[in-house]
Image (cartoon, rainbow, N blue to C red):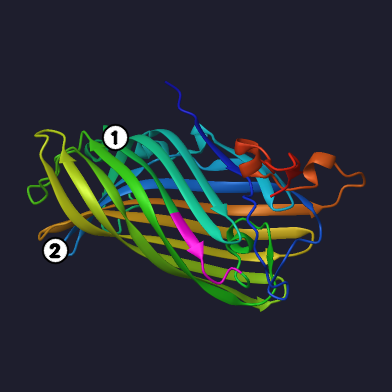
Amino acid sequence: MRYLIVLVFFSLSMSVVAQVDSTYVRDHIKSYGVKFAFGKDVLALDYTLEDKKSTQTFESNKPVSIGVGFLWGSSSFSFSHGFSFMREKEKGKTKATDFQYHHYGDKFLIDLYYKRNKGFYRYTGDHKDDTPTEDDIFPDFKIHMYGALFQYVWNNEKYSLGAAYDFNKVQVKSAGSLLLGGGVFYSSLRNIPVFSEELQDYDKRTYHFGPNIGYGYNWVPYKKVLVAGAFTFGVNGAIEENLLTNKRIFTVNPSVVGRFSLGYIGEEWIISASAIANGLFLNMKKDYQTGLLTSTFNLTVIKRFDLKREISFLKKDYNWKEAIFGSKSNDVNNTINEE
């Protein structure tokens, strides 16, 4: 069956009252923009052997995606599609249903993941670019990962995640911030290949939950250049269930999230390369460690502009709370108040 992967990124601003220092963060001069992007999404399972200091990696083989989008104010809508002919065919085929949503608000960061991948290829150490043999391709191996990560931006008056990763603001001066939050994730591995006597793994599902702490920094070395990075470390309690025996165990494992962006941020043109990586450790055994990594790489070009005639419903950012719950009403005089 012909495989097509569709990624939809729907980024709508959440209206949160925040007092932003305009000497550090400001809005774009031109209110609208069109976006073109090339992206690569990877889901991988890593085994690291303690004695031999070697690694075994199972990685998805999904095609490069091409995306387009429209931006207005602090909101955006984008769509991307991966074409099967852009996949490395010698590495097998991955069937996937993938959705990622990243909200970079003034005060809050939210990551949502929904990933269902079937079909992986294997490589060892730094031999990723080698052509795998038939014994290194596993079309029935399944990895599912769902979850959410939430963080509060401590220095939200001067530091903007949106300026670095969503381009809905402009970082005028360098600034950083502490990031505090937590995450909840679900992962499952099915039809795990038996490939080494040293690694006795099994089909499993795991529930991960716990707090995290991180730090992000936006460096503005020149007026139109932005270099941004953010790193988060978490400690998760994990309930692991062996799908063969139904036995459950509780473990404590770390998690890491890294973000990086390098871009030219002009008034009319924005050109940026960015990456996001989310790593969940599944176990930390004496003989080996297991980690699940999802990563996304993007090259983005945005052309910003103004309209000669404004579109009325685009003058305001999307208010998600009002769309879901309705406008706030005053029970005394029955008048409608905007939030």
Q: Residues within 10 Å of mark 1 (few under 14, many from 20)?
A: many
> At label 2, which amino acid type do we have?
Lys
Q: Is residue 66 above or below residue 255?
A: above
* Magenta span: 150-156
Magenta segment: does it hold 186? no
- Whole-percent x, y for residue 183 in the image: 37, 53
Picture residue at 43% right of the left edge, 65% below the top: 180
Question: Is 124 situated above or below 19?
Answer: above
Given residues 231 and 65, the one toward you in this image is 231
Q: Is residue 324 toward the left or the right of residue 313 in the image? A: left
Secondary structure, mark 2, is loop
SS for dot 1: strand
Residue 15 drawn at (x, y percent): 65, 52
Q: Which residue carries the number 1 mark?
A: 142
Q: Is residue 133 visible?
A: no
Along the viewing direction, whichever of 241 and 97 lies nearer the viewer: 241
Judging by the rendered image, the residue that carries numbered circle 2 is 52
Under mark 1, the amino acid is Lys
Can you name the residue that lies furthest to the top here? 1
Residue at (73, 72) in percent of width and height: 22
Label 2 – label 1 distance at C-alpha: 27 Å
Q: How crowded is the residue under tag 2: few (<14 C-alpha within 10 Å), some, or many (20+)?
A: few
Q: Residue furthest right?
A: 308
- Residue 225 in the image, given as x and y percentages of width and height: 67, 71
Rendered image quadrant of residue 218: bottom right
- The percent coordinates of residue 267 (x first, y second) are 79, 63
